[in-house]
Image: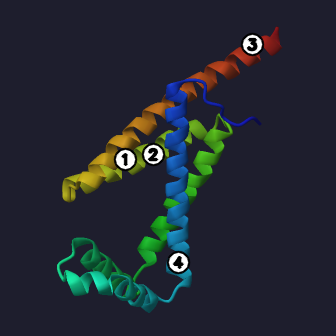
């Protein structure tokens, strides 16, 4: 099977979007593995070590206080949902990205379904607690869904034309 080769600017956008999704999925898998194999108290110790200088000079530092807060939550050790979410979310993304880049026809509808479900969750999250970052990701994911759908139409048409040529 051949790998995807971009021919136009939209093709390059599709490829970049998929690569970003693949990187995101890989980071999620690494995060899940960290939650599985790293002792919970390590996160809090590391956060305090990383932020101590910043908090000493600015005790209200937005980034530093959020890092410490998140590490405190992780240190409590109740991370089963986060671990399962990161594992499944990351694995689905990585597998689908690889299959889409290899032009596997069966992967397109699954990718559209998975990405649409992720988009629905993001829309829910935006309603519950809107953030600029989630808004950006939601718009980006909507564009990626459209690019996947567009590529699927091209690949299906190519397969149909190839089948018609072999039938003749």
Is residue 124 visible in the rendered image? The answer is no
Query: Who's the residue at 50% across and 49% down the image?
Result: 20
First in residue order: circle 4 vs circle 2: 4
Q: Quadrant of residue 36?
A: bottom right
SS state under label 2: helix
Judged by depth in the image, the label closer to the viewer, 4 or 3, is: 4
Camera-near label (4 vs 2) is 4
Residue that numbered label 4 is attached to: 34
**Element type at marker 1?**
helix
Other-residue count near label 1 (Cα within 10 Å), few / some / many at <14 / 14–19 / ≥20: some
Marks 4 and 2, Cα distance to the nearest angstrom? 25 Å
Closer to the camera, 78 or 10? 10
What residue appears at the point 45 percent right and 89 percent down from the top-left corner? 42
Q: Earlier in the sequence, mark 1 or mark 3?
A: 1
Q: Is residue 80 left or right of residue 164?
A: left
> Along the horizontal axis of the image, is 70 left or right of 23?
left
Q: Position of residue 144 (x, y in %)?
A: 45, 38
**Please, what secondary structure does the residue beneath circle 3 have?**
helix
Quarter where residue 152 is shown: top right
Of marks 4 and 1, the one in the foreground: 4
Say if 76 sits above or below 164 in the image: below
The residue to which callout 2 is attached is 115
Cα–Cα gap, marks 1 and 3: 36 Å
The answer to whether residue 161 is above or below residue 30 is: above
Circle on res. 164: 3
What mark, if any, has residue 119 been given in the picture? 1
* Mark 2 and mark 1 residues within 8 Å of each other at the beta carbon: yes
Q: In which quadrant will I find the N terminus?
A: top right
> Which mark sits nearer the N-terminus, 4 or 1?
4
Label 3 crowd (10 A; few <14 / some 14-19 / many >=20): few
Q: Earlier in the sequence, mark 2 or mark 3?
A: 2
Distance in Å between CA atoms under marks 4 and 3: 50 Å
């Amino acid at each position: 099977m051949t790998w995807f080769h971009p021919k136009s600017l939209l093709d390059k956008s599709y490829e970049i979007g998929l690569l970003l999704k693949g990187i995101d999925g890989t980071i999620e898998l690494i995060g899940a593995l960290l939650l599985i194999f790293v002792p919970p108290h390590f996160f809090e110790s590391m956060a305090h070590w990383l932020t101590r200088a910043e908090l000493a000079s600015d005790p209200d530092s937005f980034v530093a206080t959020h890092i410490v807060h998140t590490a405190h939550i992780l240190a409590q050790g109740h991370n089963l949902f986060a671990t399962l979410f990161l594992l499944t979310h990351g694995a689905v993304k990585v597998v689908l990205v690889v299959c889409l880049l290899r032009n596997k026809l069966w992967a397109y509808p699954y990718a559209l379904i998975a990405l649409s479900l992720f988009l629905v969750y993001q829309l829910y999250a935006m309603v519950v607690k809107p953030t600029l970052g989630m808004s950006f990701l939601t718009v980006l994911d909507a564009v990626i869904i459209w690019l996947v759908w567009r590529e699927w139409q091209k690949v299906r048409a190519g397969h149909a034309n190839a089948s018609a040529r072999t039938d003749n």
